[in-house]
Amino acid sequence: MTRMRQSVMAVAVALALLLVGNPPGARAQGGPPIKVGFASAMTGPSAITGEGVKWAAQMLVDEYNAKGGIMGRKIEAYFGDNAGTPGEAVSAVRKLVDVDKVDVIIGQTHSGACLGALPVVKELQVPMIIEACSNPKIRDLIGKTVNEWAFRVNPDDVMLANQFAKYMSQSTKSVSIFAQNDDFGRGAAAAYDAAFKKVGIKLVSTEFFDRGQADYRPVLTRVKRANPEAVLLVMLASEGSVFMRQFREIGLTQKLYARGSMATVEFLYQVKDSPNIADGLVEATYWTPALDPAWEKQWLERWKVPVRVHGSLAAIAFRYALVPALEQAIKKTGRTDRKAIRDALEDVDVASTPVGRIRFDDTHQAFINMLLVEINGGQLKILEKIAIQP
Amino acid sequence: MGDLLEQLIHGLTLGSLYAMVATGLALMFGVVRLVNFAHGEFYMLGGYAFWFAYGELGLPYPAAGLAAAAAMGVFGLVYERGVIRAILARTWHVQLIATLATSITLTNLAILIFGTQPREVPTRWSSTIVEVAGVRMAWQRLLVLAAAVVIFTGLEWFVTRAKLGRAMRAMSQNREACAVVGVDVQQVALATFGISAALAGGAAALISPLFNIFPDVGALLTLKAFAAVIVGGFGYVKGAIAAAFLIGLAESLAAGYVSYAYKDAIAFVVMVVVLLVRPQGLFGRRIGI
């Protein structure tokens, strides 16, 4: 009996030592799944971006869960539809937080939606990693002192415009801007207006269009009348294909620059019957399939359509910002609650990613590389990779 | 001058699109006194039907266009039997909600079935450029204008001469009297929906080679067509056609000479002004279609 009691005591002490002695991370192995919310436009004229984000999320969840999750914790993906608008973004965040009870949000893809979501993530205290919203105002609305819950991976249009305008000024003296009539388009147009002044490019005209428009010919006639040397398009591939057909139909031959998703495989897929239609177009961007051929291959095999930019950007935010933050939170605290993830995101520093180093400064902004991508012979070609300085 | 001509051609192309959709809407309202808020989605489905027939099955363009119109005609019949007949005797609130719900359902079904990637169906007509009085345009634009003339002439003949057309006119004037004299009002209503939906399908086959097809394409179109129906005098088909061309031209001239971003707003201001001056609509009449 005494021997029996001694054995039980020994096992109990050993167990207690095991629990006390192990680091928090080891205790957290296994446990409830980590709930990740993906917010993007799943309906409306921008629905193609949300579909890409959803597909990317499904690929990531399958990939990480097949490996046993993140430090033993499975991943669950939830989706919020912001329809690409500020109002719907508020509902999307509330749905993800109140109904799905997510631990973290990746999104919102569209600048207007981001601007709408920022006050709500602050109010509800849920971390949000912005993957693709480039409106410059966002910079002033996130960070340690303003909104500690939001982080942005992608550069904004002021950062891009300064570099891109310098590049344009080498061969262009006058430009007309043609931009989406939303926070993305208006933010970019204002940024390029200022950047052009710095490098001596004359801004001939600025035109805005609503997404989902069918006929661009009236405005192309205005561009023809203004006769700039080049046109800067701030638009996505879904509009770009119709626009380019009408651009050629009307007989315009101006040099084309772009911001959005024009120099992409998405665009080339849509104009596959005339792949050279946008030859010579140069886009300022931060992601292109050549940065991650394995992801592109995996995407094509799974979805049978070319890889989409916005889904890929969500994947970048997931792999190189969220996953390291989760690993760090589990190791350090053993917790993956919203506060722990937020704190860990501040310490993320991944030097080698396809888009450059991901580390958030005090304004919660990362400084990844900027790319200049050209459409040449119906193919994409990286012209320059430029490191953006804080 | 070349500039103005260019804007007028854009306006007429857009007007043709609005007119073909508005005609169906006006026919439906004229005959059964119901506003079909899902009518833009008929155009969207017609676009996908055309894409399938032309792009996937590889049918020749005229055959694919007719197939899209026929497919939508059948869809119109099914819609009348499945949705409209059940709500025809109900209040306008119920009709509004039912047609709006159909619109949302069809858009989301299109997202599920066809995905969000816009479909492009360029034809030889849309890829070949012709120059008319210094204005470059795709042959397809001329085809749209010519087809609009043929379709509207045919429709005028149909509603004034054909037995079914005259029955539709009669119903737009007095449904009860028609029933009393032995007109099968349910069959006429059914045919009206078939014809209206086929018109939307035909419009999609004509316009899709110039513009994209995507699930949300019908939303703004319904609004424009609805505006044309109001301005033209509710339920008066010729009025809706004229008003549709007016809206198309106003939009194009506003985009070309004032502001592209506010072209829709300007077109709708024109509509409000017309209604202030003529509350009964531009061509308001007591007799319907």
Image (cartoon, coloured by chain):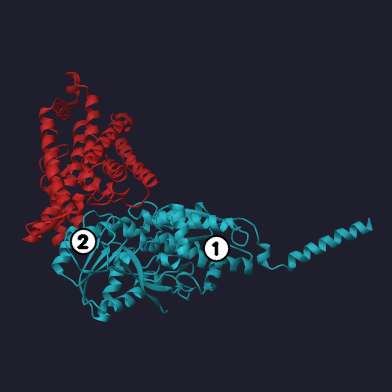
Chain colours: A cyan, B red
Q: Earlier in the sequence, mark 2 or mark 1?
A: 2
Q: Position of residue B187 (x, y in %)?
A: 24, 25
Q: Position of residue A124 (x, y in %)?
A: 49, 61
Quarter of the image with the N terminus of chain B in it? bottom left
Q: Nearer the viewer, residue A126 or A329?
A: A329
Q: CA distance from mark 2 to mark 1?
A: 48 Å
Q: Are marks 2 and 1 in contact (CB under 8 Å)?
A: no
Which residue is located at x 26 percent, y 43 percent? Answer: B43
In this picture, residue A228 sits left or right of residue A142: left
Q: Quadrant of residue A271?
A: bottom left
* SS under mark 1: helix
> Up-down: is A300 above or below A130?
above
Q: Which residue is mark 2?
A: A247
Q: Nearer the viewer, residue B47 or B248?
A: B47
Q: Position of residue A298 (x, y in %)?
A: 47, 58
| Amino acid at circle 1 | Arg
* SS under mark 2: helix
Q: Which residue is mark 1?
A: A338
> Up-down: is A66 above or below A341?
above
In this picture, residue B154 sits left or right of residue B199: left
Q: Position of residue A292 (x, y in %)?
A: 45, 66
Quarter of the image with the C terminus of chain B in it? top left
Which residue is located at x 59 percent, y 61 percent? Answer: A70
| Amino acid at circle 2 | Phe
Q: Quadrant of residue A283?
A: bottom left
Query: How many C-alpha atoms fall within 10 Å of the one at disc 1: few (<14), some, or many (≥20)?
Result: some
Which residue is located at x 12 percent, y 53 percent? Answer: B9
Chain letter behind tag 2: A
